[in-house]
Structures are given as C-alpha cells and as structure tokens.
Amino acid sequence: MNKSGKYLVWTALSVLGAFALGYIALNRGEQINALWIVVASVCVYLIAYRFYGLYIAKKVLAVDPTRMTPAVRHNDGLDYVPTDKKVLFGHHFAAIAGAGPLVGP
C-alpha cells in the first residue's frame, strides 16, 4: 500500500472513531447499541497502538533496529541462541501453565 493509502486508512479510522464517540456522548439517557462502544474502543485502541506505540519506541525507549540482540552477541548455543520469532511466540505461550492444553505436551 502506498503512503497516501495508509494516510487514508488512518484518517478513515479516526473519523469513524470520532463519530462513534460523538454518537455515544450525544445520546445520553437514551438506549444505544453496544456496537457503538465496541467500534469507538477499537478505533481508539488501534490509533493509540499505532501512534503512541511509535512515540514510545522512538522517543522513550530509543529503539535501534541495527543494534545486535543479546542472542546474537552472546551466542553460546545454550542460553543465548538466535531463534525465529514464530518459535519464540510458541515458547511464550508454552511457558504459561494455563495454556498447556492449547499448546500440547
């Protein structure tokens, strides 16, 4: 997707979220559909994830994608091993005791 298409998607998401929040705010005392609350919250969460997350990564944490990770720097074959992110995602849920039946033995 080109740059203007991305701006258009985020603008549409912002307008939809603003409309949903406005609908909730202006219909006080009347019954409203819960879908308006869901749409407003999803729009706010997505916008916050995209823009506030980018702010945190760049300004607060100063994330540098060219910096070596400890798995690459200390590759000892035991504790520090470079691994594919899909495998790490599976290990994350395997470490949770309640997810044992979902992941398997």
Image: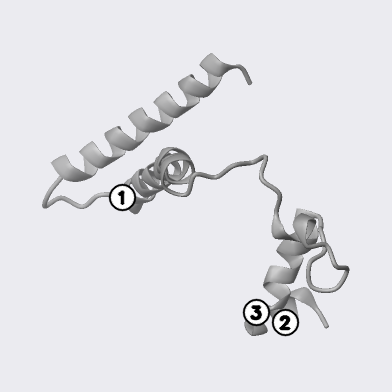
Question: Which label lies toward us, 1 or 3?
Answer: 3
- Determine which residue is flagged by label 2: 100
Q: Quadrant of residue 91?
A: bottom right
- Report the side of 63 relative to 68 (left or right): left
Q: For residue 96, which numbered disc appears in the image?
A: 3
The one of 84 and 60 positioned closer to us in this rendering: 60
Where disc 2 sits, the SS reads: helix
- Check contact, mark 2 vs mark 3: CB within 8 A: yes
- Residue at the image position 29 percent from the left and 34 percent from the top: 18
Can you identify the residue that label 1 sits on?
A: 33
Specify which label sits upstream in the sequence, 2 or 1: 1
Compute the Cα span from label 1 to label 3. Answer: 36 Å
Report the Cα–Cα distance between label 2 and label 1.
Answer: 37 Å
Residue 28: image location, x then y, percent: 12, 48
Q: Nearer the viewer, residue 32 or 49?
A: 49
Q: Is residue 1 above or below residue 103?
A: above
Q: For the residue labelled by badge 3, is the local secondary structure a helix, a strand or a loop?
A: loop
Amino acid type for the residue under numbered disc 1:
Asn
Q: How is the image coloured?
A: one colour
Q: Position of residue 96 (x, y in %)?
A: 65, 79
